[in-house]
Image (spheres, helix red, strand yellow):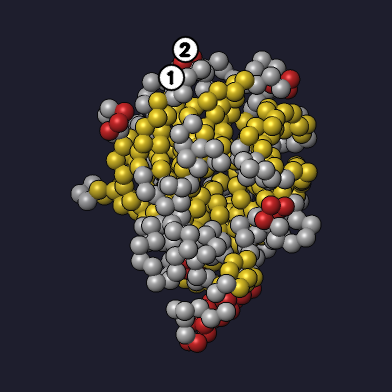
C-alpha cells in the first residue's frame, strides 16, 4: 500500500531503521549520543522464573502488599473479561506463605467495567492495607476495605469518584498534609490529571472532593508521587504519551514528562506544573527514584509504547532524568540513556545485584505495528529485561523473557524473604493475541543472587 507522504527514498530509510533495530539487538554493543549499552553479557545475577497466574483473560495491573498482616508480601491483581458492552472484572489477592508459595483469594467478583492498574494503602486509618482501583471503562475510582479476615471475601466497596474519564493510573499519598491518604489519577483520554481529597472515616460513604490539576495531556498514563524539590511536600509525576496517530512530520505531538509542584496553598491552587521533557516521543510509565544517590529524586522512564509512531531507534528506549538543583537558575533535568528497547512500556529501578547502585528493569509491550497499512514485525518487543548499571552511563542489558506477549506492568519486591529484590511482571498476551497459544500471565523472577551459585 502506497503511503501518500512517502517517496521511495523514505521507504528505504524505514527499511534502514528496521535494519538498525536488528543491529542494536544482535551486536555486542551500541554507542549512542547519551551513553553505551553492552548487549546480553554474562549474567551477574541468576533469576529463576515462576508462573504465578496464567488462567485469566486480561491482566493489566499488579501490586505487592501485606494484605493479611503476617509480615510477608502478598499480591493483588484484576482479571478482566473483555466481552460484552462494558466488560466485567474480578479482583484477587494471592496469599504468600512467606516462602513464595501462593494461594488465591477473591476480593471482589463480577464488577462491571475494566479494573486495571491500582494502588494499596491504609485509606481509613484502621491499620490494615486497602486497595484502590481504577475502572477504565466507566471512569471511576473505587476502594475496597480490607476486613478483619481478608481471606473470607467480605471486602466492602466504596466509590471515590464517578468523574475520572478513562481512568488509567492511580496513586495514594497524603497530598494535603492532613495525615490521611488522598488519591491522584491520570485519565487516559481526554488527558486529565486530578486529585481527590480523603474525607476521613466519617465521609467514607460519600464521593471524595475532586479537583483538576491539569487538562489536555494527550493520552495521560503515569501518575506517581514523590518530593522532587525536597521541601517536605508530596509532588506528582505524570506523562502524556502523545497523539496516537502522529507521523514523523508532526511537531505538536504533545508528548510530555512533567512534575506538579505541591505549593501547599488552597486546594484549588495547590499545583504548579514543571516540564521535565517535552521533546522525547511516547513516554509511557516511569517512577521517581534517586538514581545517582545524591539525596534527591530523579525519574526513570520508558519511551516508545505507542505503536503508531515511526520506527526510529532514538524514539524507543529507557532513560533516566537527573534532577539538577541549580541555585541561581532553578531546577533542571538532564537526560541519560539507559538502553534502547523497542516499544518500551514501563521502567523501574532497584539495586538487583547488590553492588550499591541502581539497576533498571523494563518491559516492552508489542512486537508488531502497522507501517503504511501493513503489519510489520520488529525485533525486541514483548520482553522483560534488566539493565545492569556499570557506572558513568555504561549499561549492560540482560533478558529475563523474550516471549512475554503484551508485557505491561513490572514491579520489584522480596517475595520469599531472602533479602534480595525479585521481579514480578504481567502480560496481556491472550488479549493482544500476538501468536496462537499466548496467555495473560503473572510471572515472578526470583533473585537467586550470584550466577555462579
- Position above or below: 100 against 361: above
Q: Where does residue 87 sit, x and y in percent of width and height?
A: 65, 41
Identified at 54% across, 58% down, the residue is: 305
Classify mark 1: residues with Cα within 10 Å, few (<14), some (14-19) or many (20+): some
Q: Where does residue 42 sit, x and y in percent of width and height?
A: 68, 63
- Quadrant location of residue 362? bottom right
Q: Nearer the viewer, residue 447 or 119?
A: 119
As helix, strand or loop, the secondary structure at mark 2 comes to: helix
Determine which residue is flagged by label 1: 199
Q: Quadrant of the N terminus?
A: bottom right
Q: Where does residue 388 sit, x and y in percent of width and height?
A: 58, 57
The count of marks equals: 2
Do labels 1 and 2 touch, CB within 8 Å? yes
Q: Is residue 401 visible?
A: no
Give the side of residue 60 with respect to residue 452, left or right. Answer: left
Identified at 52% across, 70% down, the residue is: 311
Which residue is the extreme one toward the front? 85
| Cα separation between marks 1 and 2 | 7 Å
Residue 202: image tag = 2
Q: Is residue 218 visible?
A: yes
Which residue is the extreme one toward the top? 202
As helix, strand or loop, the secondary structure at mark 1 comes to: loop
Identified at 27% across, 27% down, the residue is: 266
Amino acid at each position: 500500500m502506497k503511503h501518500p507522504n512517502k517517496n521511495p527514498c523514505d521507504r528505504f530509510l524505514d527499511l534502514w531503521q528496521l535494519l538498525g533495530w536488528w543491529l542494536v539487538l544482535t551486536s555486542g554493543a551500541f554507542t549512542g549520543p547519551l551513553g553505551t549499552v553492552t548487549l546480553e553479557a554474562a549474567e551477574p545475577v541468576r533469576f529463576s522464573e515462576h508462573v504465578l497466574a496464567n488462567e485469566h483473560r486480561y491482566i493489566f495491573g499488579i501490586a505487592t502488599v501485606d494484605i493479611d498482616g503476617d509480615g510477608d508480601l502478598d499480591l493483588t491483581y484484576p482479571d478482566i473479561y473483555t466481552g460484552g458492552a462494558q466488560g466485567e472484572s474480578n479482583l484477587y489477592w494471592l496469599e504468600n506463605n512467606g516462602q513464595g508459595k501462593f494461594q488465591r483469594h477473591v476480593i471482589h467478583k463480577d464488577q462491571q467495567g475494566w479494573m486495571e492498574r491500582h494502588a494499596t494503602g491504609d485509606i481509613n486509618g484502621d491499620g490494615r492495607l486497602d486497595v484502590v482501583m481504577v475502572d477504565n471503562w466507566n471512569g471511576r475510582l473505587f476502594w475496597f476495605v480490607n476486613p478483619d479476615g481478608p481471606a473470607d471475601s467480605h471486602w466492602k466497596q466504596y466509590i471515590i469518584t464517578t468523574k475520572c474519564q478513562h481512568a488509567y493510573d492511580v496513586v495514594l499519598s497524603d497530598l494535603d498534609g492532613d495525615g490521611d491518604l488522598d488519591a491522584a489519577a491520570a485519565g487516559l483520554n481526554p488527558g486529565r490529571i486530578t486529585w481527590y481529597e480523603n474525607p476521613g472515616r466519617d465521609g467514607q460513604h460519600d464521593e471524595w472532593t475532586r479537583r483538576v490539576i491539569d487538562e489536555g495531556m494527550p493520552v495521560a498514563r503515569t501518575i506517581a508521587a514523590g518530593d522532587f524539590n525536597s521541601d517536605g511536600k508530596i509532588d506528582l509525576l505524570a506523562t502524556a504519551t502523545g497523539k496516537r496517530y502522529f507521523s514523523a512530520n508532526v511537531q505538536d505531538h504533545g508528548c510530555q514528562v512533567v512534575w506538579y509542584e505541591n505549593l501547599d496553598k488552597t486546594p484549588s491552587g495547590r499545583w504548579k506544573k514543571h516540564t521535565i521533557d517535552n521533546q522525547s516521543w511516547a513516554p509511557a510509565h516511569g517512577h521517581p527514584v534517586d538514581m545517582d544517590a545524591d539525596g534527591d529524586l530523579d525519574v526513570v522512564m520508558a519511551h516508545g509504547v505507542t505503536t503508531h509512531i515511526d520506527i526510529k531507534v532514538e524514539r524507543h528506549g529507557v532513560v533516566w532524568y537527573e534532577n539538577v538543583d541549580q541555585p541561581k537558575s532553578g531546577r533542571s533535568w538532564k537526560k541519560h540513556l539507559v538502553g534502547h528497547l523497542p516499544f518500551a512500556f514501563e521502567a523501574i529501578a532497584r539495586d538487583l545485584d547488590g553492588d550499591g547502585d541502581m539497576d533498571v528493569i523494563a518491559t516492552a509491550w508489542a512486537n508488531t505495528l502497522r507501517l503504511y497499512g501493513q503489519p510489520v514485525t520488529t525485533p525486541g518487543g514483548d520482553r522483560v529485561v534488566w539493565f545492569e548499571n556499570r557506572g558513568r552511563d555504561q549499561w549492560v542489558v540482560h533478558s529475563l523473557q523474550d516471549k512475554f506477549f503484551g508485557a505491561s506492568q513490572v514491579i520489584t519486591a522480596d517475595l520469599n524473604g531472602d533479602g534480595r529484590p525479585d521481579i514480578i511482571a504481567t502480560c496481556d498476551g491472550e488479549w493482544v493475541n500476538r501468536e496462537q497459544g499466548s496467555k495473560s500471565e503473572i510471572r515472578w523472577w526470583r533473585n537467586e543472587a550470584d550466577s555462579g551459585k
